[in-house]
């Protein structure tokens, strides 16, 4: 499944780079959770999930607190969520979610990354039929005392699909189920490992040329290293080797 492979991509390749990607994403989740609610993990369920994940990866407390403060507008900066859609090397669709206090800077940077690899930015909505947005919760099996009850409660909350793989339940549903599933988990006292709204590709594009693949990977690296970028989605078709490694 493409989304799952993307979620564990940090486990592949160079270990140091993988840890850096997980570290950065974990802090960005804290920022987004703080931005959308209370700065107190005791009253902001999603922030608690994000902070717990940071602690799991040994993210320093100071970094976590800065991310929470930034989410609350600390320093007087107002952050806006801005999305960019385009095509990278090989015609692979790339959807970029950012949170920025300076859109002029961010769009210039994102455009430059696409230009460096001969890609192109498109109009908003140009990838409307390439990705679908889904609510995703990853729940460790160890946190669930009664599997049957858990699945029934998740379905009642709006989940469309519940899969168990590697001791992790993946609960997915339409965007509007995000809140109800969160509330149901809180009521059940079940803590998810991750909670997010993601964009899943409806179709995929293969890259067969090695040089084109290198250029595509360069684009993804440039985007993920940008402080304004929150998440990068793409519809690259995975090879069998990548799937086996995952």
Image: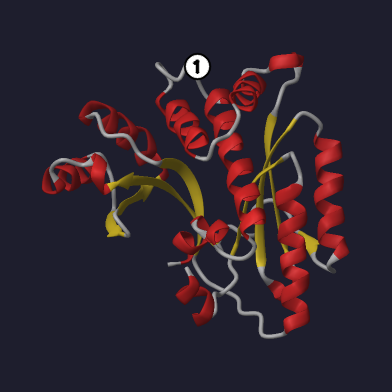
Instruction: Give the quadrant of residue 73.
Output: top right
Front residue (pair 84, 238): 238
Residue at left 46%, top 76%?
244
Tell me if residue 36 can be seen: yes
Specify the color scheme: secondary structure
Residue at left 72%, top 85%?
209
Return the residue at label 1. 38
Q: Position of residue 147 (x, y in %)?
A: 15, 48
- What is the secondary structure assignment of the residue under circle 1? loop
- Quadrant for the N terminus, please: bottom left
Front residue (pair 231, 123): 231
Residue at left 18%, top 40%?
153
Kindly give the residue lying farthest to the bottom in the view shown. Answer: 208
| Crowd around label 1: few <14 · some 14–19 · many ≥20 (10 Å) | some
Q: Position of residue 170 (x, y in %)?
A: 34, 52
Residue at left 19%, top 48%?
151
Q: Is residue 14 above or below residue 61?
A: below
Describe residue 246's horizontal placement relative to residue 112 as left or right: left
Front residue (pair 25, 34): 25
Instruction: Give the quadrant of residue 226.
Output: top right
Q: Is residue 164 above or below residue 206?
A: above
Count of numbered labels shown in the rendering: 1
Describe residue 140's horizontal placement relative to residue 119 as left or right: left
Q: Position of residue 108 (x, y in %)?
A: 87, 46
Describe residue 100's horizontal placement relative to residue 118 as left or right: left
Q: Position of residue 52 (x, y in %)?
A: 45, 32
Describe residue 192's horizontal placement relative to residue 17 as left or right: left
């Amino acid at each position: 499944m493409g989304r799952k492979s993307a979620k564990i991509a940090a486990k592949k390749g160079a270990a140091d780079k993988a840890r850096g990607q997980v570290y950065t994403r974990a802090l960005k989740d804290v920022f987004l959770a703080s931005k959308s609610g209370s700065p107190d993990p005791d009253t902001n369920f999603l922030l608690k999930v994000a902070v717990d994940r940071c602690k799991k990866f040994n993210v320093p407390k100071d970094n976590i607190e800065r991310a929470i403060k930034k989410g609350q507008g600390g320093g007087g900066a107002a952050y806006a969520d801005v999305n960019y859609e385009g095509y990278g090397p090989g015609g692979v669709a790339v959807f970029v979610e950012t949170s920025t206090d300076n859109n002029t800077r961010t769009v210039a940077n994102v455009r430059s990354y696409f230009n460096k690899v001969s890609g192109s930015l498109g109009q908003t909505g140009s990838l409307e039929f390439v990705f679908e947005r889904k609510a995703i919760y990853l729940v460790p099996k160890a946190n669930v005392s009664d599997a049957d009850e858990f699945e029934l409660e998740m379905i009642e909350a709006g989940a469309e699909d519940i899969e168990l793989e590697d001791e992790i339940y993946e609960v997915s549903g339409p965007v509007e189920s995000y809140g109800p599933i969160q509330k149901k988990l809180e009521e059940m006292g079940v803590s998810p490992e991750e909670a997010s709204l993601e964009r899943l590709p409806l179709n995929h594009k293969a890259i067969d040329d090695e040089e084109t693949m290198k250029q595509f990977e360069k684009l993804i690296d440039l985007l993920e290293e940008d402080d304004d970028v929150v998440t990068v989605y793409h519809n690259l078709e995975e090879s069998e080797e990548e799937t086996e490694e995952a």
